[in-house]
Amino acid sequence: MRFVLEFDNVTKEYRSFASKRRLRALDGFSLTVEAGEIFGFLGPNGAGKSTAIHLAMGFMRPTSGSGRLLGERFGHPATRRRVGFLAESVALYHRRAERLVRFYGALNGMGGTHLETRARQVLEIVGLRDHANRNAGKFSRGMLQRVGLAQAMVNDPDLLILDEPTSALDPLARVMVRELLLGARNAGKTIFLSSHLLSEVELVCDRVAVLHRGRLARLGRTADLLQVGEQTEIVVRAIAVKHFDGAVARDGVVSFSVPAHTQRAALEKVWNLGGEVVSVNPLRRSLEEIFLEVTADPQSPPFAGNQ
Amino acid sequence: MKPVLLIAVNFAREQRWPILTLLLWVLLLAFLGLVTDIHRQREDLLFVFKQDAIYVLAFSVFFGGSAIYNERRSRRILSVLSKAVGRQQYLSGLVLGVTLACAVYCFALGLTGSWTLGETGFPISHLWFLMVCLVAACMLAGTVALMFSTFLNPFFAAGATAMVLGLPALAGQFLGPQWGYVIPVWELGTTVVNSSFRSPGTASWFPVVLAAAETLAFWLLSARIFAYVDIAVAVE
């Protein structure tokens, strides 16, 4: 099985009971997630990210289209035994953290000493070993999110679907989650990660999709998306800004970008002018720039409106 | 079966405060048994006993009607249904949970009733039969409320449940007593309410069996409806 998660032309409309108004959250959405990758799922609020995730988990049915999770149609309960899910704004029962994790593990058919050991193990992984006997109802939001992660991992899932897993975490905990995700990928797991923390996504994700107004606006390998065509950024010292178009001086260095095929000529010009080359790198954008570019796009109808 | 039991016990646990509040009424009955001359006040004790019995029936509708709503509103339903739990299993767990919560109360009431009313001559075996009737009525009433709550908010679900449970009783008044058995919650309730020291009533198991069968039917219907319901709404 190559794809662990597939959306095939999925449309989801929310219908108001009182009026006949329909809100199209997903519009002909297609996407495949490959086994063993960390997949970043981005989009502004209201883009349809959580809707797509809830469809995949079987919490709702698509208005049209279909999808498969680990080879089975969405909503197949037994398949979810191999899935770990963390919802946005995680909400859990008020009971001791270890018991809580064991409860969720037992719902997945786990039991006995294996479950006890695994529950302790995942609580240790998320840094809650010392709080295992505390009531989760008294936890801070960040701690709750850690328990949420623990319950998602207790069954050692093949696929982790995480909706904003780091939103309430402090920087240290974010590093912990990042290492956890990379470790899971190295162990052959697949991670589907929805997040607004673009820097985190940029650091860990192999591929990224940007959803905007229910449609797929960008999809590709993170490295490819961040690279800007055939442009090279050159940073030099000891030359004047006027020698290169678009050059910017900052902190004692001058930086400018040139098409990759003129890179050699540009470097020779720097040397001929008596300058010193500091760095030469393919020009990269940040994920934030791509995100802003996509979300500023006036294309794609926002709603289906009254139909 | 394991997830069903886990969900049921978890539900009963989540309802511990309403159950404990209800149990205060049972404590009141026990208190009356301690401080009064139970032989002289036995009619009053029976009245309190019946009153306590009817309260749990109302609470079963409250438990059933609000179960899904509370879980959805708190978003805790997502973490449960993200596991290998089918929606039918989830509903089974809630039906069992409602029954369990009511059964705990009925058991406590039965124990206290056995002590207080039993001392004053009420047949204890019949008292426990009444408790079985009460649990059966609660199970059915809770399941009907749960069925309505799959697509209505708790307030309307409770109203619709009251109508569904009350209409056969009304029909029984005007069209003949057999109509009261269409949905036998009222019939089971009146078995409890009409019992007295002079005439405790006869132990007819027919409405109990009918209530169990109808619970199954309403559970199947609610599972059918719930399978098509979006349980998570847009959070963005």
Image (cartoon, grey):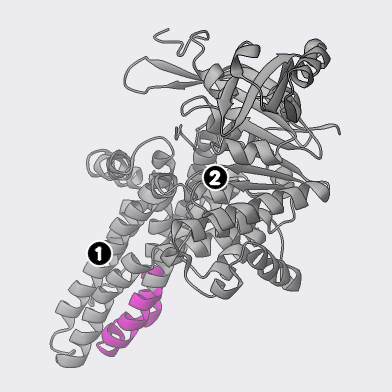
Residue nearer the viewer, A214 or A57: A214
| Relative horizontal placement of residue B22, taking residue A205 as reference (left or right) | left
How far is mark 2 from mark 1, CA to CA? 48 Å
Return the mark for residue A87: 2
Tell me where residue A135 appears, x and y as whole percent. 47, 70
Say which of marks 2 and 1 sits in front.
2
| Relative horizontal placement of residue A171, taking residue B66 as reference (left or right) | right
| Relative horizontal placement of residue A29, taking residue A274 as reference (left or right) | left
Instruction: Please say if B194 is above or below A297.
Output: below
Residue range in magenta is B107-131
Tell me where residue B4 appears, x and y as whole percent. 59, 57
Residue nearer the viewer, B50 or A189: A189
Q: Say which amino acid is labelled 1.
A: Val
Magenta: main secondary structure = helix
| Relative horizontal placement of residue A58, taking residue B16 as reference (left or right) | right
Q: Residue B124: within the magenta?
A: yes
